Image: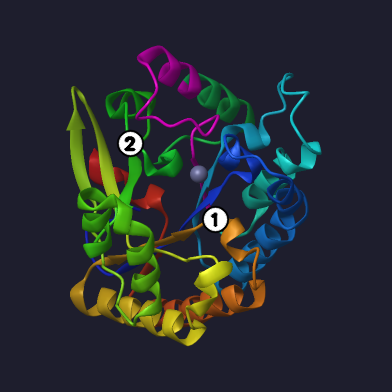
Amino acid sequence: MSIQSGPALCISIDLELMWGRWDRIDGSSIRLAEQAERPIVRRLLELAERYDIPMTWAVVGRVFDDAPGFENLPGPRAAWFAPELVEAIQNSPVAHDIGSHSHGHAYFDELSDAEASLDLERDLELRKRWGIPMRSWVFPCNKIGHLEKLAKAGVAVYRTHDAGWLESVRNHVPRLYPVGNLLDKILPITPPLVGAHARTFGEYRAVALPSSTLLLGRDGLRRLVLSSVSKFRWLRALENATTQHKVFHPWFHPSNFYTDAETQFSILETLFRAAARKRDAGVLRIVTMADFSEAAS
Ligand SMILES: [Zn+2]
């Protein structure tokens, strides 16, 4: 299915376990990655199945890479590796998209050409073994780089940044971004809608798809974000998507569910229920990032 335009919901999830924090390792993160990640991912898959909602899972390659090496990582292996979760996504009756969040959660804006090629080659080789095509790509920490190399390797769609005012704050006054981010989620500001744009890199093409908003975790000050406000913001974005013929593209990590998972799942289920109703009424498409890929060709 190719989506050029029209009302759609697209959800992307960055699945990374401890690879997402390889440069900020601490005991409690290791424990949570080992113990909390699996039940959350399984529950996300169950919820997606209940409402038939396909999503893009942007997975760090090493999470399911069983090639030898990395024997001396801190903490239990289960905090770093979970091939069984990728298997569960593959085996789901819902047509999920297994995108890449790079092979080693490297920051692509800092990599040399050779380092970027190596990361890509490893991920392509792993995916060949698993029979998973590389269509969608999410940059670690949304740090964008080496786009021509990615497009040449077959990446057809990549996630850029959250659209809207908050991203302007990040670009122009980065020190205000944390407080801006919190305010953006506390106040009933409707998340921005997005559209896909085909871009050319040398002789290759790929589609740039911004995201709308992050489902913020509920730890620390962030617990001030009322779940009723989150639900209101997301439902209004969904409503706007249908009337403005645009895409609502929320994203999150399973780790954003570590604190107060019940509230987070209730926000997500509210969105799923409303989206399924709109889909069944024929006014909304529920798509993955890969569904935007043909817009590139
Ligand atoms: Zn990440």
Which amino acid type is shown beneath numbered disc 2?
A: Ile
Circle 1 residues within 10 Å: few <14, some 14–19, many ≥20: many
Residue 95, image x and y in percent?
53, 55
Which amino acid type is shown beneath numbered disc 1?
A: His
SS category of the residue bearing label 2: loop
Residue occupying image coordinates x 21% and y 56%: 168
Q: Which disc number belongs to residue 144? A: 2
Magenta-tinted stretch: 95-120
Residue 283 in view, yes or no: no
Residue 230, image x and y in percent?
44, 79
Name the colour scheme: rainbow
Q: Nearer the viewer, residue 224 or 269?
A: 224
Residue 117 in view, yes or no: yes
Residue 128, image x and y in percent?
57, 26
Separation of residues labelled 2 and 1 (CA atoms): 18 Å
Residue denoted by label 1: 253
Residue 50, image x and y in percent?
62, 73
Asked if residue 109 is among those painted magenta in the image, a careful observer would answer: yes
Q: Quadrant of residue 129?
A: top right
> Could you tell me which quadrant the C terminus lies in?
top left
* Image height of 253 relative to 145, above or below: below
Circle 2 residues within 10 Å: few <14, some 14–19, many ≥20: some
Pointer 2 with pointer 1, Cβ within 8 A: no
* Image height of 198 relative to 246, above or below: above
